[in-house]
């Protein structure tokens, strides 16, 4: 029985290929456990913002360091679900879009955010919002096929792109240089616009609703996700498809790009998140909590070390990127192939041939055993039951962590 329990837990770790799947913290983003629709990091990475379904919808801010709830705003009964949340890059404003198309703007310059303005977009529904890089404008994706842009200070409508999409506009993003706006719709198309609302390129190729669009920090590529379960990379300068990334078994509901522009993080209805190499589309890691329901949204912290996710069960979770990827000694992210495999017949754990040495730590961080990989396995017969972290060092110097449970 001991081995069977051990193997089930280890198989979960292997299936998700998570290096010591350490969750920094996990909190409920709504007192009624309503679905999280959007998460975002403050520009300094010190806080995480979330918005949820209704009734009533919640907008909350958590400390990134410890998950402490810093601010809890319950949206009034006149409004519906919060579909999108964003910090301005100077952190002075918090912008949210409510399901009926109302934009709620909060002044975030004080100790706690204070409602500054409510802008009525006169649309049936609103789905996403973003703030321009210069913090002067708010763009909104609307259900009537329109993109609307407002002055963040006055709330005045600056630009309206009519018939931006033939159906609902589901997502929107600015390029980092402020030169382009990218939108995605339920017409399965991604569109690239200049800031004056002139259409530059139509990107066709997805087979279902676009769920999110992002622009890389170097302003060269557009990344899109869709309900067809794929991620696509487009050239922002000509609208051409660069590659299609597949691997999720359900809708890809959200994506974000690492601050160094080298990786894509994705969240899916298949209860998993993945990290991909942007340059060639290879999968670097898969992580998540089994049976957690659809993961709706994902955000990468500004320093690249954390990822925040929000799921249908109202769990906002902060993950350690270095542990997910098995970060090497340098500042760049790297990963090593899965090193630990369960053996149902013995108390031995098989090691990869790429592993040269290992260390096993208990849940207090104390070293239990260490050694060179001379036999290709670790003998756990004399190790007491408990939770452990295995640190494996590869031939190329990269480090991989794995969670070990002995019952």
Image (cartoon, rainbow, N blue to C red):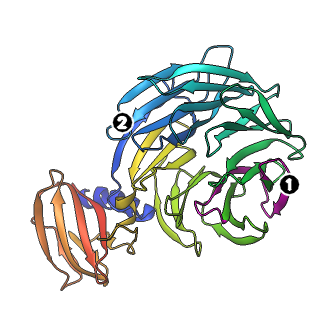
- Locate residue 384: give its quadrant: bottom left
Q: Position of residue 390 (x, y in %)?
A: 23, 65
Residue carrying label 2: 67
State which quarter of the image contains the C terminus: bottom left
Residue 56 visible in rendering: no
Foreground pick, 51 / 7: 51
Whether residue 241 is situated above or below residue 83 in the rendered picture: below
Foreground pick, 11 / 352: 352
195 magenta-colored:
yes
**Label annotation for residue 247:** none
> Which residue is rendered at x = 62% and y = 24% of the image?
54
Residue carrying label 1: 199
Q: How packed is label 2: few (under 14 Cα within 10 Å), some, or many (20 or more)?
A: some
Cα distance in 3D space between marks 1 and 2: 42 Å
State which quarter of the image contains the N terminus: bottom left
Q: Nearer the viewer, mark 1 or mark 2?
A: 1
């Amino acid at each position: 029985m001991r081995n069977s329990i051990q193997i089930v837990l280890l198989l979960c770790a292997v299936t998700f290929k998570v290096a010591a799947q350490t969750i920094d913290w996990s909190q409920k983003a709504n007192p009624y456990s309503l679905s999280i629709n959007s998460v975002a990091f403050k520009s300094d990475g010190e806080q995480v913002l979330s918005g949820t379904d209704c009734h009533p919808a919640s907008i909350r801010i958590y400390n990134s360091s410890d998950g402490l709830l810093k601010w809890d705003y319950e949206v009034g009964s006149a409004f519906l679900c919060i579909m999108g949340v964003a910090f301005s890059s100077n952190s002075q404003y918090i912008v949210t879009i409510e399901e009926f198309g109302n934009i709620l703007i909060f002044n975030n310059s004080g100790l706690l955010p204070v409602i500054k303005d409510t802008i009525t977009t006169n649309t049936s529904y609103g789905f996403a919002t973003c703030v321009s890089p210069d913090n002067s404008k708010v763009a909104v994706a609307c259900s009537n096929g329109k993109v609307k842009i407002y002055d963040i200070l006055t709330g005045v409508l600056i630009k309206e792109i009519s018939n931006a999409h033939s159906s609902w506009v589901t997502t929107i993003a600015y390029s980092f240089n402020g030169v382009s706006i990218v939108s995605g719709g339920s017409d399965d198309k991604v569109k690239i616009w200049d800031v004056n609302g002139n259409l530059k390129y139509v990107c066709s190729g997805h087979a279902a609703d676009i769920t999110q669009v992002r622009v890389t920090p170097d302003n060269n590529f557009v990344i899109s996700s869709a309900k067809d379960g794929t991620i696509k990379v487009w050239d922002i300068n000509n609208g051409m498809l660069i590659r299609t990334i597949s691997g999720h078994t359900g809708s890809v509901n959200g994506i974000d790009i690492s601050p160094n522009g080298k990786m894509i993080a994705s969240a899916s209805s298949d209860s998993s998140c993945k990290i991909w190499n942007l340059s060639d589309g290879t999968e670097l890691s898969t992580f998540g909590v089994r049976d957690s329901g659809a993961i709706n949204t994902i955000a990468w912290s500004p320093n690249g070390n954390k990822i925040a996710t929000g799921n249908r069960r109202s769990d906002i979770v902060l993950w350690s990127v270095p542990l997910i990827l098995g970060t090497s000694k340098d500042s760049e992210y790297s990963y090593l192939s899965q090193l630990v495999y369960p053996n149902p017949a013995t108390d031995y754990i098989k090691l990869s041939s790429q592993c040269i040495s290992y260390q096993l730590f208990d849940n207090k961080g104390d070293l239990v055993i260490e050694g060179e990989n001379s036999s290709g396995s670790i003998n756990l017969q004399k190790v007491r039951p408990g939770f452990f972290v295995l640190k494996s060092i590869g031939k190329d110097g990269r480090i991989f962590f794995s969670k070990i449970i002995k019952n």
